[in-house]
Image (cartoon, grey):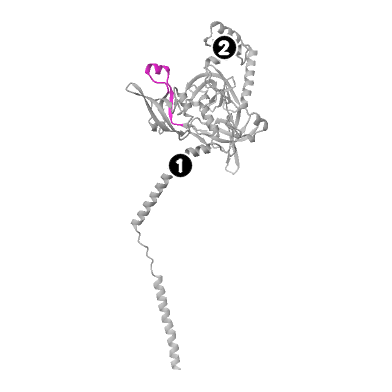
Amino acid sequence: MEDNKKKENKTPYKSDESSEKSGAFQQSIISEQIKRRPINKYRLLRRTGVTALLAIIFGVVASLTIWVLEPFLSRLVARTDQGQPRDAVHFIDTGDDITPQEVLYDYMDQEAGLGNTRNESYSNSSRTSLPLDDDQIRALSSKLALDQTNYRQLYQAMAAYTKEMNRSIVTISAITSDIDWIGITEKHSKQASGLIVAEDSVDIYILADRTPLVGSETLQVQFSTGDSAEGRLKAVDAATGLAMIAVSIQDLSPELANDIPLATLGSTYAAVGTPVCALGSPMGSVGSVGYGMISASRSTLEYADTADTMLQTDIAGASNAGGFLFNYNGQVIGIIAPDQKKSDVGGLLWAYGISELKNRISAMAEGRPYIYIGIIGTYVTSDANAELGVPYGAYVLRTDMDSPAMLAGIRTGDVIVRLGDTPISNYAEYISALQSYNVGDRITAAVMRKSQQQYVELEYIMTARSSGIVYE
């Protein structure tokens, strides 16, 4: 019995001892610390260098790919903003500029009661007998005696004329929304006058001042017929501040869609004293009208690769005037400039001549880029040619900073006499020839540069870029 008790006493003792050892072993495991592996600075530096090198290689490859594919992608995207097939964009353009002699003879024909039919006495062979002699002047002046009845009839005729011209003018409402302090949504609207300038099989295209349209959420276009349709901003020209609005023909009534009143784009040439009317919003409100004449005409040199002409009128207008100048042949001859503070005479309207803007307008409507190389130039006068020996061509006044022309080496005083295979004899021919190229094309320009009292011919190669027309 005692032996059994001894055995029983030993067993619990051994169990306590083993548990104490087990607890001590677990405590030793728990108290161990995990040490971090020491950093291999050389391996880290090597991996960082490899990553940076791969990033540089990727950037170079991406840049080269974009540089190679950008011209092709630009042309592809610019073709159309919808998946529907389109016909060519259609404009109404009178073509070549008219001369002062043609203006005078048209007036003489109308005075003779011939309308648009030419008087045989004013044949092309006899039209060289300018100026008019005293008898002709007295004969024309004798018909100008007017009384109050004629005065009233004159303004009635002018009102009927402006009503007809207003068919091609629309009102564009730029609508924005805002939430006031109590959570009520309010809609705000600004209005601008637009001109229907072109159409294709899908859309009609409306030219307008972009200033009232900035920040708009929707554009609502109101036509002279009472039709209303939603418009979308297609393009904005940063240089002139003009915008092109597109309206789907499907959104128009059948009557309007079958008889779209396209405006006729005329000629910038307008002799001082030519009567004009301002339509759109010349007085600051949509639908206003002003009558007057061209009081001055001069060239502006604000934008590269264009030759804008400013037409000054004697029409007093608003500081926020907009709209278009029409002559009395039913043709648009100018676009009222949005910033009237540039005018030399306060309060009088002036407009950009339409002829110099036709290329930009067609580019915006067709969705193609307007070619840019950055030359601000002018014409070589006959006096400069005869007295100073300056060759005829496009005279370079200056080049834009970092433009293709400047980077190629063209500088002030050079005279461009050829673009590619096209000879250039004046600045207008340079502008026209430039538009035959595409973005990304390499253009060879032959220039005459004065060196040691004589002009020598040099050639420069430029890569054409896109101008400031932004397509939405």
Residue 382 painted magenta: yes
Does the stretch in magenta take in 32?
no
Relative depth, front residue between 18 and 333: 333
Q: Residue furthest top?
A: 135
Tag 1 secondary structure: helix
Q: Secondary structure at mark 2?
A: loop
Cβ–Cβ under 8 Å for marks 2 and 1: no
Residue hosting label 1: 66
Decide: few, some or many residues near mark 2? Use Cα within 10 Å; few <14, some 14-19, many ≥20: few
* Vertical side of 109 occupied by 364: above or below: below
Residue 131 is situated, as x and y percent measured from the top left of the image, at 52, 10
- Which residue is most to the bottom? 1
Instruction: Give 1 or 109, whichever is nearer the viewer.
Output: 109
Q: Is residue 285 left or right of residue 238?
A: right
Q: Which residues are magenta?
A: 372-393
Please identify the quarter of the rendering in which residue 407 is found: top left
Q: Identity of the amino acid at label 1?
A: Ile
Q: x, y percentage for residue 400? A: 42, 31
Can see residue 410? Answer: no
Q: Earlier in the sequence, mark 2 or mark 1?
A: 1
Q: Which residue is mark 2?
A: 123
Q: Residue lying at the far front in this picture: please name it.
A: 421
Residue shown at the point (62%, 21%) measured from the top left: 161
Residue 316: where, in percent of width, then height?
A: 54, 22
Q: CA distance from mark 2 to mark 1?
A: 60 Å
